[in-house]
């Protein structure tokens, strides 16, 4: 069961990578809502986007992706794996989300954003690295404790279904 749950986490991580790849397919400025506010302001000043587009893209991302990720986790844990108890649901949710979080931190943030040119927005190169050390620390902290809290909530929702 643990191996299957880890594989489901890899699937969720792959889904996140696909979402990001689609998001930056015409240039990273389409995903600038994920960047530091200074980068967003520079993009607006350069005429690459508007505040309204950034807000719209951010809301679209949150409205589609977050519920989609949570639905994926709930389907894996309760429909596929057949969890029936709160704690079995919790640990499976936590493993899936933690694997996805590792993919996000190590592959997307550290490698893809930090070491390739795919996420560079022309005219903002002086603002790199885009993910500063303090931001990385916050992401690791949320990834650890935040995923536990989200897993508790999802396990409770799963018990109601």
Image (cartoon, rainbow, N blue to C red):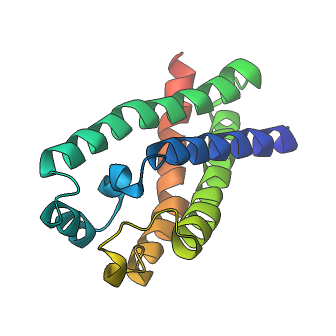
Q: Position of residue 65 (x, y in %)?
A: 45, 36
Front-most of residues 4 and 128:
128
Q: How many marks?
A: 0
Front-most of residues 50 and 131:
50
Above or below 146: residue 129: below
Residue at (45%, 45%) from the top-left corner?
A: 23
Residue at (15%, 51%) from the top-left corner?
A: 50
Above or below 41: residue 83: above
Q: Position of residue 140 (x, y in %)?
A: 52, 69
Above or below 28: residue 20: above
Q: Is residue 91 visible?
A: no
Residue at (75%, 21%) from the top-left corner?
A: 80
Quarter holding the C terminus? top right
Front-most of residues 103 and 151:
103
Residue at (69%, 18%) from the top-left corner?
A: 79
Q: Position of residue 70 (x, y in %)?
A: 51, 33
**Along the horizontal axis of the image, is 148 left or right of 67?**
right
Q: Is residue 55 visible?
A: yes
Q: Position of residue 57 (x, y in %)?
A: 29, 41
Quarter holding the N terminus? top right
Q: Quarter-wise, where is residue 41 in the image?
A: bottom left
Q: Quarter-wise, where is residue 45 in the image?
A: bottom left
């Amino acid at each position: 069961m643990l191996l299957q749950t880890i594989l489901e986490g890899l699937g969720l991580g792959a889904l996140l990578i696909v979402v990001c790849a689609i998001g930056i397919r015409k240039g990273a400025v389409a995903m600038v809502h994920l960047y530091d506010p200074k980068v967003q302001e520079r993009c607006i000043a350069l005429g690459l986007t508007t505040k309204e587009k950034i807000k719209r893209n951010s809301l679209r991302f949150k409205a589609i992706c977050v519920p989609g990720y949570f639905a994926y986790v709930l389907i894996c844990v309760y429909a596929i794996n057949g969890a029936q108890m709160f704690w079995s649901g919790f640990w499976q949710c936590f493993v899936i989300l933690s694997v996805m979080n590792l993919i996000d931190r190590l592959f997307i943030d550290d490698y893809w954003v930090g070491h390739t040119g795919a996420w560079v927005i022309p005219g903002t190169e002086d603002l790199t690295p885009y993910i500063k050390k303090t931001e990385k620390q916050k992401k690791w902290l949320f990834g650890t404790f935040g995923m536990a809290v989200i897993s508790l909530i999802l396990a409770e929702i799963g018990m109601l279904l």
